[in-house]
Image (tube, rainbow, N blue to C red):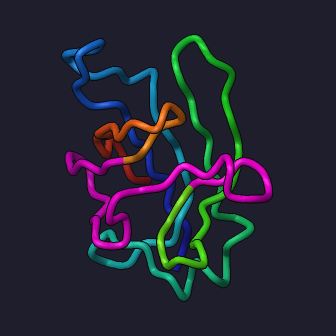
Amino acid sequence: MSLKTIRLELGRTPRWPDGNPDCGYEFKAPLDDTGHINVEEWRAHRNASTVRRFWQGEDDENGHLIHTRHGTWAFSYAPGEEDDTPFFRFESHAFVPGEYVTITEHDGEPYTFRVASVT
């Protein structure tokens, strides 16, 4: 199984009623044939499962896709849980273009992101 690059772009918000392709995440993860993250393959490729957070007007952040001790997925930019960006039901989402996922952003608020591409 090869790693896929998944690009998530911010969906509609009060500030951006049409969404914003300049705010989001690009990450690498092993996906199965249905677009779900393959946990066993992730364990074998965890160091290569990276993320880049890009946000209009802010510096990019780089880190890793992690599977927490609580059994949830998150993006982590430094050791420890303080900076982790958790997901809502990430394990059940299929990463296929046009689908949506919810991520709790740095401000503690959940935002919806559209799967823009999977390559």
Say if 75 sits above or below 73 in the image: above
Quadrant in which residue 3 is drawn:
bottom right
Relative to 83, 102 lies left or right = left
Considering only vertical position in the picture, is 13 above or below 61? above
**In the picture shown, does residue 60 fall above or below 4?**
above
Image position, residue 39 (x, y; %): 50, 82
Of residue 97 and residue 100, the one placed in the foreground of this image is 100
- Asked if residue 52 lies in the magenta stretch, the reply is no
In the foreground, 11 or 109? 109
Residue at the spot 62% in from the left edge and 41% down from the top edge = 52
Question: Camera-side residue: 68 or 63?
Answer: 68
Question: What residue is at 42 percent from the left and 56 percent from the top?
Answer: 87
* Residue at the right extreme of this rendering: 79
User: Residue at 20% across / 18% down in the picture?
Assistant: 18
- x then y, percent, for residue 46: 68, 72
Answer whether residue 87 is magenta in the image: yes
Q: How many marks?
A: 0
In magenta, the rendered stretch is 75-102
Where's residue 100, x and y in %? Answer: 24, 48
- The correct choice, above or below, for 23 with respect to 85 in the image is above
Quadrant of the rendered image containing residue 14:
top left
Q: Residue farthest to the bottom? A: 40
> Toward which corner of the image does residue 104 lie, by quadrant?
top left
| Horizontal relation, residue 109 to residue 19: left or right | right
Q: Residue at x 32, y 65 (%)?
A: 89
Picture coordinates of residue 109 (x, y %)?
39, 36
